[in-house]
Image: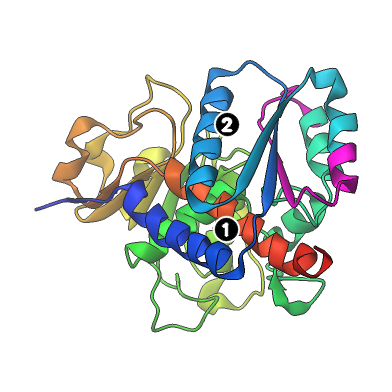
Amino acid sequence: MSCKKVLASDIAQVYRDEVKKIISSKGIRPKLVGFLANNDPAAVKYAKWTGKSCQEIGVEFELRECPREELESRIMEANEDKNVHGMMIYYPVYGDRQDQYLQNIVDYHKDVEGLCHMYVSNMYHNIRYINKDENKKSIIPCTPLGIVKVLEYIKVYNPVLPYGNRLYGRVIGIINRSEVVGRPLAALLANDGAKIYSIDINNIEIFTRGAGLKLHMHKVQETSLQLEEVIPQCDVVITGVPSKSYKLSTDMLRDGVVAINFSAFKNFEDNVTEKASIYVPAVGQVTIAMLERNLLRLYEYFHENLE
């Protein structure tokens, strides 16, 4: 079998070109502020990528570094600053529930990461618009949204089916259940009709809208299933284990599987291409493209007529 390797840069470029065209045609310059209150090398690298990418498409980016004890007040200042159109925080800051508190004090008008309570609640409850305004789509967290766009790009989503049901019949395994990526991704994909095996170190849960898509939003079922039982069933396997040593055995994968990795480390074995029909080794550039797309969307929703 010939495996097609799909690069995040090719997928991201489609969305970045669209954002750049709109910014140029309208003669606007949305401003994104990033808050860096840690010394995490991955966060520093992400901040650098964000600034470079924003500059290329016409977004003004300002990185504001501060001690974590000052971060709350700096966020509140940015909430009130009409010249700031979007903001993001490079996590982890405290690495605990205090980070969730920080997510929730970001004004939803400026929350490009989609992590405040309203956007998270909408996502889990399959509410697709802000305050039932069908002209304003709810903001979705960037990495889960980026993976959705990857799946659309490689035609895992079936455009023949109605919007909201286009993953009907798909079985997808996600090896990660973090609150930042894995769990929201499972909810998003289940809400679009897929059967999801959500896999973490403790157990495997099933996210589904029920037989025949009877439910409006997904439900979660705990199971006693093992990894080797569920992975061979999956049309798509998505990995996000933050460990250099973790490798998913290629022998578990079904022939023709779609394999997607969003971890900073390669979670698939090198011979994954012997089983996979499509392999996406990373999604980082799509994540940044979604960040920029969310910023433009918030600018158009809440700021465009106030300039």
Would you place residue 252 above or below residue 135 in this image? above
| Of pointers 1 and 2, the one earlier in the residue sequence | 2
* Element class at badge 2: helix
Total labels: the figure holds 2
- Crowding around mark 2 (Cα neighbors within 10 Å: few <14, some 14 to 19, many 20+) is many
Tell me how far mark 1 sits from mark 2, CA to CA: 17 Å
Q: Which residue is pictured at 21% across the width and 39% down the height?
A: 272
Q: Which mark is residue 238?
A: none
Q: Is residue 234 magenta?
A: no
Residue 161 position in % (x across, y down): 43, 83
Query: According to the image, label 2 marks what residue?
Result: 47
Would you place residue 266 above or below residue 30 in this image? above
* Element class at badge 1: helix
| Horizontal side, residue 34 vs residue 147: left or right | right
Which of the colour schemes (rainbow, by chain, secondary structure, one colour) is used?
Answer: rainbow
Residue 248 position in % (x across, y down): 33, 33
Quarter of the image with the C terminus is: bottom right
Q: Quadrant of residue 273?
A: top left
Front one among 203 and 279: 279
Observer able to see residue 101: yes
Front one among 131 and 258: 131
